[in-house]
Amino acid sequence: MDLTVVGAEELPKALENARRSRLLALYFIGSTKTSTIPGLSVAGATPELTLYTPACDVEYMVYGRPKSFDAIPVTPEGIPTPAVITRACLKLCSFPYVVVDVGSALEPKIPHISLPSRRVGEPIDTGRALPIEVASSLYEEAKTLARALRGIDLFMLGESIPGGTTTTLGILSALGYNAWGKVSSASPSNPHELKERVVKEGLAKAGVKVEEARRNPLKAVAAVGDPVHVSIAGFTHGALEAGAKVVLAGGTQMASVLAIAKHMGVDVSDVAVATTRWIISDRTSSLADLIRQIEPSVKIVAANLDFSDAPFEGLRYYEKGYVKEGVGAGGTAVLAHLTTGKTMKQLQEAIYEEYRALTQK
Amino acid sequence: MDLTVVGAEELPKALENARRSRLLALYFIGSTKTSTIPGLSVAGATPELTLYTPACDVEYMVYGRPKSFDAIPVTPEGIPTPAVITRACLKLCSFPYVVVDVGSALEPKIPHISLPSRRVGEPIDTGRALPIEVASSLYEEAKTLARALRGIDLFMLGESIPGGTTTTLGILSALGYNAWGKVSSASPSNPHELKERVVKEGLAKAGVKVEEARRNPLKAVAAVGDPVHVSIAGFTHGALEAGAKVVLAGGTQMASVLAIAKHMGVDVSDVAVATTRWIISDRTSSLADLIRQIEPSVKIVAANLDFSDAPFEGLRYYEKGYVKEGVGAGGTAVLAHLTTGKTMKQLQEAIYEEYRALTQK
């Protein structure tokens, strides 16, 4: 089976006509200094390097090698970025894609959409992740962008933001959802306790009440959020308003996008989440549970990628719980399958080929 | 007659299926300090202000008011920017559009695509408009952008760059075309002599030979060009390579885009130019003659806008030879007509309405 739809037989509505859709994939990148808290994020060889992962991810995605640094982003163990999956799948597809910089610590050296209010998020244990005006501007600018892109039928929205599961825990907690122990990690040993401590510290300092945050979710973002999720939420708002369908391409992080949009008054029930098998079978997190709390009619579809037989150790590590998702890897695989008819096995071959090229550079 | 096709009966091939096309309009903005040479450009209330016109144009286009300054760009006489036409037409259309910043003196406060090598051009009388690496990077980055936007059938490419007709004169002259007295102006009294002096000074200082420039047109751009035309040329290259159709939305400036692309080895014969009636009936310039020299099979189509009966003096001035074109005004009107079926008369009403809203703010 190439795809798994969680708790359902049929594809989510948003994906029904993917093949004939005017489809545009957008990859939102941004940084939060939260990712530099030691032990929190493995989306980079060192905590400091996680700040540069988003730019390097998308440079690699477009050019086949990063331009800002000499090597692709890896975990401290050397396991490669999921952008390898994204790039391999995009190469097989024929739909357009663009990167959107909403606050990357490095400006990516590729053509990209910039939101004027882009800004790196502060560590969320300060309780002051973003000035509220910035959170609000990012939401509005992303909405404006979606409006200008009227005429597109289907948007796939991916992300690259190390530390994004921790800010997701922050945003969801501020909005009164029970997300403790439920957000994912690029590490097999999900540092739930550390994430919880960071979030609780931020929430305590910000002192934002649940009812207050539910009335204005930008307050949750300003306290313990980041530039990426609020921007994707704003874009989703504008896209749905313009009559487009939206597929959020990511793991548990997309729960915070749904939560922000929902509390901004958006009906997100027809939005779909597209991710990888590694996310939906992860025992250290629960995307399904988070989504059930926020909007149970949102469907999750997963690309059943399996690297057990991969000829490269770096990829086989994915089967041990490393990396799992990012840079819209799962969603891009789902759409590559739906728009080209290629099987997961064929996509895997392309991913292995891509990885081979990488190791030979 | 809503449209005029110069020297032909039928629509250019590029526009044949506009209505059913996956169409994307891109508005390229950039600055050249050439526009601050007194007397050269009227695309701003003062020579200095012309540097800010591109950002203000597109901010107004998206939001209905500029964000960086308090007022829309006007000529020294107070005649409003052609972005009024663009905005009014875009509001009637349902195709997506995005702004591309390739070197605006001000970053526009709207979501926009950035080319990493964006840079304001130096005054071309120095003979050193852009470092050649920058010219080359802009060309390549724009080409990369077009490749990522595969799947789009038809691109409309507009521009906003005050001083752009002078850099066009520079580029075309460096490439051995006879453009003296043939480039347009936003003023009814086209300052041909001043333009000629500025270009000749730049060419003399740069010392680039025609054969050399024809082998590598980026040398012409580096000497007496600007960031915008080379970027549109690079984008055109990538778009045609990806099988898309290209409509250049502008006046005589688009001749330099064609010339750069042609000498970069691109077959531009199926590209169309879409502009306004004011350009093709202008006696102080000749778009048709320029295009005949570069690639005679390129067709020109004009939107027959007529502001003789406009209820606003600012717009009636267009009939006296002021402004004429810019921010893709003509091309956007052409595509608004072709995709919505609205007549020029209906478009004019919308433009008057837009202008009315503006004067009431």
Image (tube, coloured by chain):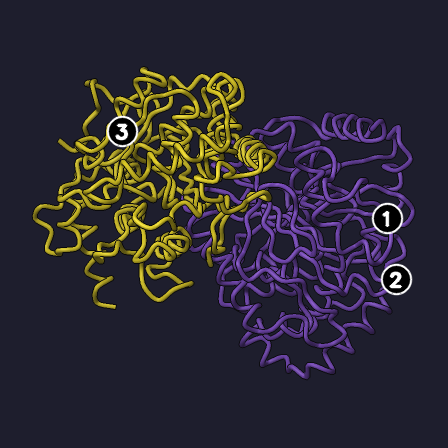
Chain colours: A purple, B yellow
Across and down, in percent, residue B234 comes to 51, 30
Instruction: Give left or right: position of B286 versus B28.
Output: left
The amino acid beneath tag 2 is: Gly
Instruction: Give left or right: position of A79 versus B229.
Output: right
Q: Are marks 3 and 1 on the same chain?
A: no
Quarter of the figure with the N terminus of chain B: top left
Q: CA distance from mark 3 to mark 1?
A: 59 Å
Category of crowding for the residue at label 1, using alpha-carbon neighbours closer than 10 angstroms: few (below 14), some (14–19), many (at least 20): many
Across and down, in percent, residue B134 comes to 58, 38
Which residue is tagged 2?
A39
Subunit under mark 2: A
SS type, badge 1: loop
Subunit under mark 1: A
Would you identify the image quadrant in which residue B253 lies? top left
Q: Are marks 2 and 3 on the same chain?
A: no
Residue at the image position 12 percent from the left and 55 percent from the top: B313
Q: CA distance from mark 2 to mark 3?
A: 65 Å
Instruction: Give left or right: position of B54 versus A285.
Output: left
Q: Is residue A324 above or below residue B24?
A: below
The amino acid beneath tag 1 is: Thr
Across and down, in percent, residue A1 comes to 72, 33
Subunit under mark 3: B
The image's mark for residue B39 is none
Are dots 3 and 1 in contact, CB under 8 Å? no
Which residue is tagged 3?
B182
Which residue is tagged 1?
A75
Are dots 2 and 3 in contact, CB under 8 Å? no
Give whichever of discs 2 and 1 has the lower sequence position: 2
Across and down, in percent, residue A78 comes to 89, 43
